């Protein structure tokens, strides 16, 4: 199993076959171009990002993800919900309505 992470915290583990998980450090946008752990086209079953997608160069990320993902596989992005726009923000009620609508449509 190959895994790519964006930080240098030490992680270890194995999969059900006891094969070690091999990690590499990379930005989300460069997952397909990593020098020490190259990821081949159509070789990834899942990409998961928890509370981090706001840091990505999202257009570059999608290009890399589209190249490495197997056909029909998934990108999973999650974040905490329930964002509230502070009342001091001009037109906060209209902005909040848009945030709520988007969250209800895509995150629930």
Image (cartoon, helix red, strand yellow):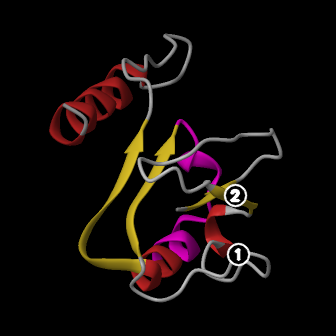
Q: Residue at horizontal 56%, vertical 12%? A: 88
Q: In the figure, residue 45 lies in which quadrant?
A: bottom left
Residue 91 is situated, as x and y percent measured from the top left of the image, at 42, 26
Provide the secondary structure element on which disc 1 rests: loop
Q: Residue at horizontal 53%, vertical 35%? A: 51
CA distance for labels 1 and 2: 8 Å
Quarter of the picture holding the C terminus? top left
Is 68 displayed left or right of 24 in the figure?
A: left
Residue beneath disc 2: 23
Q: Do residues under tags 1 and 2 come within 8 Å of each other at their CB atoms?
A: yes
Q: In the figure, residue 20 lies in which quadrant?
A: bottom right
Is 47 displayed left or right of 19 in the figure?
A: left
Residue 22 is situated, as x and y percent measured from the top left of the image, at 66, 60
Residue 21 is a magenta residue: no
Residue 13 is situated, as x and y percent measured from the top left of the image, at 61, 41
Q: Residue at horizontal 52%, vertical 13%? A: 86
Give the main secondary structure, helix, strand or loop, of the magenta stretch: helix
Residue beneath disc 1: 37
- Position of residue 62 relative to residue 14, above or below, is below
Provide the secondary structure element on which disc 2 rests: strand
The region drawn magenta spans 51-62
Q: In the figure, residue 2 lies in which quadrant?
A: bottom right
């Amino acid at each position: 199993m190959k895994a790519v992470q964006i930080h240098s915290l030490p992680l270890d583990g194995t999969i059900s076959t006891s094969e070690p998980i091999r990690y590499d450090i990379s930005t989300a946008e460069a997952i397909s171009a990593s020098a020490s752990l190259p990821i081949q086209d159509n070789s990834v079953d899942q990409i998961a990002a928890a509370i981090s997608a706001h840091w990505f160069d999202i257009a570059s990320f999608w290009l890399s993800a589209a190249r490495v993902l197997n056909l029909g596989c998934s990108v999973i992005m999650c974040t905490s919900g329930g964002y509230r726009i502070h009342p001091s923000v001009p037109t906060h009620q209209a902005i909040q309505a848009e945030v709520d609508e988007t969250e209800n449509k895509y995150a629930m």
